[in-house]
Every structure is written in structure tokens, then in C-alpha cells.
């Protein structure tokens, strides 16, 4: 929720109709005051008079380009979230804007509900960062990081380790099962570090084809290869003043592992086609859902790279080991779902809480979020009961797998995660009316990841009408 304090939203767009649309969308939201600017010059003038709390920026404008204005605003307003709007044919430019520090992007025509939800989430994140900045040195009992992660003994240990390593230049390995929240931990390290004002960039090491991975990571010079018609910074340069997360680093191919090892050893980056190395200024964090130590012993991952990237290791426990933290997370997800789905579900009754605590949650926090979101959508009363949750949780179990077979426990867990993922994709496609780009944004994944998941689960673009 936006809270009681009034917020100022600066909408920068040369299209009068678009500016009026934004004003009308927030007309019924008294906590948001919309001010407009017709171009980059007037936007900078407005900012000089009064800083906004959030900026909505069209990337296609005359005069100062959208990307140039984005960089200027990021320098003037480092803590203010910048949401960019672009035509669907300019998604590449929008991705570049994200790399330059934009919070998120929307494609035209703008969906009013999606815009409101994004603005609310951006402001909530700003509030959280402000709290974290003010309370870095507080004891655990008053630490907002603990309030966000949980107060169970294993999560208190995670919070302590985050505080210990955040201010250092150590490379960090965050390990844990799929869906436990490894990126949340990585973001917390970034937010509590001296680099908090710089970009946080996440690379899914399994989502980019091997033949494109090195150019995306290291960048390239003009003429480095066929099609390289201009120089491009890689993600190691984009995250230069901030943090780069290698998500599921175990998926890196051997050749890229060798080049990354050299980067860590020499603290330099050599773009493709260049003979002049550049100093590495980014803080590197790595995440994995498998044991890299075992992979190194078995020859599936370079042992020397493993020891380089694991200077400091944080293990995120599975959800089933976090006790009543689960209920705290469930209430948070309920609030998020109420905002997103425009529902007014008040909470969980005792039977629902007992059901939540009794489930093993093989899909961890991700599974919990999906179940709560569906429960809010389907709830017929003001509170969620055991009956509301029972069919959703049972739907995540694999009836075809014999429960009595101890060797099948891993299969049960894998099947539960796959069922939850497939269901979430179908619901996102239904909400997006078959638009895969919009569905990917709703799921907070990139387009390629969604495409691969759809192919894996046999989902066609017409499934959303059949589910």
C-alpha cells in the first residue's frame, strides 16, 4: 500500500493524450499527485524545483532522447524509481534502459491496473531501501532486514551473514534450493552495501544461448564479429558501480567459466574484439541451487573457479525449516495479491494457518506465493480457510507418484514445482490474454525463460483459453 504520505509522480511524455491518461489513472488515488512534462528540458526544470517520488518516462521524445534523460535523472535522483514506457517494437531499447538503472518498463498501450501496481511496488521498494539505510547498524530485534527475511533461527543467521559481508568486496556464493529466495538475499547484500545507489543487475546463466552469452557478459567492440555494427558494454560494465548477480552459475559453459576465472583473478574485463582490458568495478554475487563443490569434484564445474567465487558462502534454508516465518511470508503475499487482484481478503483462519504449517513446500517460497495468490483470487469469504487452501496445495502434489516409495521423494518435489510453474504460466497467459511478453512481465521472468518453460510443459499460446 502507498501509505498516508502524498507522493509526487512526474509523467514525462510529448503525447498529450498519454499525459492525460496517466492523470486519469491516478485521479482516484489521492496519495499520488501527477505532474507532467512535455519533454526532457521541462522534466529537468520540474525536477530542479521539486524532486518527484517516482518518474514515468516515455523513451521516444524529441530533443533530449529518453535514454539520455534517463541517465541525467538517474544522476540527479539516484534513489527515485524510473519507470519507462516504450512501444512494443522497442523492447530492446527498454532492456537497455533497465541496464542503465530504470526500475521497470511498460509497453504501449499501457494497462492502467498494471501501471498502478508497478508504481505501488516501486514506491514500497523505495520505502524499504530508506528503512534499510537508516537502520543498518540496529540490533537484530529492530532490524528491518530481519523483519523482511524472518525471525526464525536459520533466517537470523542469514541476516547476520548479509550484514557481515555487505560492506566488503568479497565475492559471495548464495546457495539453496529452487524458490528459497536467493535473489532476495543478493539484493539485500547490494542494498546494504556502499554500492546501493548503483545498479543491481541479474543474469540468468541458463536463459541466454551459449553463442550469445560471452558478448552479453563481456561486451564487444565494433567489428568484433559479423553483425557487431557498434560498440556495446557487457553486463560486467553495466553493473560497474553496482552489483552483478550470476543466477544459477552452475549453468555456465566451460569456456565462459575459464574467462570468468580470469576476470576474478585479474579484476579486469576484456570485451570481445578489444586488446585493452577495463578495470572490473562491479561487485559479483553468485547463486546456485546445486552443490558447486560436488560439481567441481565430479569435473562438471571448474574447481579453481569455485574457490574464487565462494569467498563467502550464504546458505538459504528451505521454507519448511523456517517455522512460523512461513505465516509472515503468507500474510505478505496475501497483501500483495489483494493489491494486484483488487481483493479485500483479510487473512487466514486458524485451520488455514495449520494447513500452511503442515505442508512441506517442496517449491519453497515460490510455491507459497503461487498458492496464496490463487487462494486470494478464488476466496469466497473475507478469510481464507483450510478448505480454500487444501485443494490448491493438493493440486501441487503428484498423485501419480507412489507416496510410500522413499526413493520417489525427489520426484515428488520436482513434480510439485513443475505443477506450480505450469499453473502460474497458464494463469499469467490468461491474465495477459495470450500476450507472452506481458505474461513474462507478470511472472517477473524474461521472454526467453517463459518461452523455454512453455515448450518444456507443452503449453501453446491457446492454452490460456482452455485452462
Image (cartoon, rainbow, N blue to C red):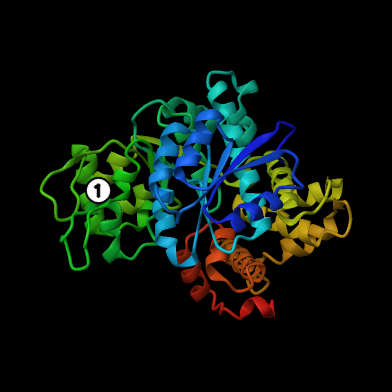
The one of 387 and 217 positioned closer to us in this rendering: 217
Q: Residue furthest left?
A: 275
Please indicate whether residue 93 sits to the left or right of residue 143 in the image: left
Please indicate whether residue 148 sits to the left or right of residue 455 in the image: right
Q: Residue at position x 27%, y 66% from top?
A: 211
**Which residue, given by chain and number where applicable, does mark 1 sit on?**
260
Q: Residue at position x 77%, y 60% from top?
A: 377
Which x, y percent locates residue 128?
60, 33
Q: Residue furthest right?
A: 381
Quadrant location of the C terminus in the rendered image? bottom right
Q: Is residue 384 visible?
A: yes
Q: Residue at position x 23%, y 44% from top?
A: 304
Mark 1 closeness class: few <14, some 14–19, many ≥20 residues within 10 Å: many
The one of 306 and 210 positioned closer to us in this rendering: 210
Quadrant hosting residue 418 = bottom right
Quadrant location of the N terminus in the rendered image? top right
Which x, y percent locates residue 423?
64, 68
Which x, y percent locates residue 78?
46, 33
Please indicate whether residue 432 sits to the left or right of residue 14 in the image: right
14 versus 169 height, above or below: below
Q: How many marks?
A: 1
Q: Residue at position x 48%, y 47% from top?
A: 39
The one of 311 and 440 positioned closer to us in this rendering: 440
Q: Is residue 315 visible?
A: no
User: Secondary structure under badge 1?
Assistant: helix
Which x, y percent locates residue 413?
59, 61
165 versus 374 height, above or below: above
Amino acid at each position: 500500500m502507498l501509505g498516508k504520505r502524498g507522493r509526487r509522480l512526474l509523467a514525462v511524455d510529448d503525447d498529450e493524450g498519454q499525459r492525460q491518461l496517466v492523470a486519469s489513472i491516478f485521479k482516484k488515488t489521492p496519495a499520488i499527485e501527477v505532474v507532467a512534462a512535455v519533454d526532457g528540458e521541462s522534466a529537468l526544470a520540474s525536477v530542479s524545483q521539486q524532486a518527484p517520488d517516482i518518474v514515468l518516462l516515455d523513451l521516444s521524445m524529441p530533443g533530449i532522447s529518453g535514454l539520455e534523460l534517463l541517465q541525467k535523472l538517474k544522476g540527479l535522483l539516484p534513489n527515485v524509481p524510473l519507470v519507462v514506457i516504450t512501444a512494443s517494437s522497442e523492447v530492446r531499447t527498454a532492456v537497455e534502459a533497465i541496464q542503465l538503472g530504470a526500475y521497470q518498463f511498460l509497453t504501449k498501450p499501457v494497462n492502467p491496473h498494471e501501471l498502478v501496481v508497478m508504481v505501488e511496488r516501486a514506491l514500497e521498494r523505495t520505502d524499504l531501501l530508506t528503512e534499510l539505510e537508516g537502520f543498518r547498524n540496529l540490533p537484530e530485534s529492530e532490524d528491518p532486514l530481519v523483519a523482511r527475511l524472518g525471525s526464525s533461527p536459520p533466517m537470523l543467521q542469514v541476516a547476520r551473514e548479509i550484514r557481515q559481508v555487505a560492506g566488503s568486496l568479497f565475492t559471495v556464493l548464495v546457495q539453496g534450493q529452487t524458490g528459497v529466495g536467493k535473489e532476495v538475499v543478493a539484493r539485500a547484500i547490494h542494498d546494504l552495501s556502499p554500492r546501493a545507489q548503483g545498479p543491481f543487475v541479474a543474469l540468468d546463466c541458463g536463459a541466454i544461448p551459449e553463442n550469445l552469452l560471452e558478448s552479453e557478459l563481456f561486451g564487444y567492440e565494433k567489428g568484433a564479429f559479423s553483425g557487431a555494427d557498434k560498440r556495446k558494454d557487457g553486463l560486467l560494465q553495466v553493473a560497474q558501480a553496482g552489483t552483478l548477480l550470476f543466477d544459477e552459475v552452475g549453468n555456465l559453459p566451460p569456456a565462459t567459466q575459464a574467462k570468468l576465472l580470469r576476470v576474478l583473478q585479474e579484476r579486469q574485463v576484456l570485451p570481445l574484439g578489444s586488446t585493452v582490458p577495463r578495470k572490473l568495478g562491479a561487485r559479483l554475487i553468485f547463486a546456485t541451487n546445486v552443490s558447486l563443490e560436488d560439481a567441481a569434484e565430479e569435473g562438471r564445474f571448474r574447481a579453481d573457479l569455485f574457490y574464487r567465487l565462494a569467498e563467502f558462502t550464504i546458505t538459504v534454508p528451505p521454507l519448511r525449516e523456517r517455522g512460523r516465518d512461513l505465516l509472515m511470508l503468507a500474510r505478505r503475499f496475501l497483501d500483495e495479491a489483494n493489491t494486484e487482484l483488487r481483493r479485500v481478503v483479510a487473512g487466514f483462519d486458524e485451520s488455514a494457518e495449520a494447513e500452511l504449517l503442515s505442508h512441506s513446500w517442496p517449491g519453497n517460497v515460490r510455491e507459497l506465493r503461487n498458492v496464496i495468490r490463487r487462494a486470494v483470487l478464488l476466496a469466497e469469504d473475507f478469510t481464507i480457510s483450510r478448505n480454500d487452501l487444501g485443494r490448491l496445495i493438493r493440486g501441487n502434489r503428484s498423485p501419480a507418484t507412489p507416496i510410500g516409495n522413499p526413493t520417489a521423494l525427489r520426484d515428488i518435489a520436482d513434480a510439485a514445482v513443475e505443477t506450480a510453474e505450469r499453473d502460474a504460466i497458464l494463469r499469467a497467459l490468461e491474465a495477459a490474454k495470450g500476450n507472452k511478453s506481458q505474461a513474462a512481465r507478470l511472472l517477473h521472468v524474461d521472454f526467453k525463460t517463459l518461452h523455454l518453460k512453455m515448450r518444456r510443459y507443452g503449453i501453446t499460446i491457446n492454452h490460456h483459453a482452455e485452462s
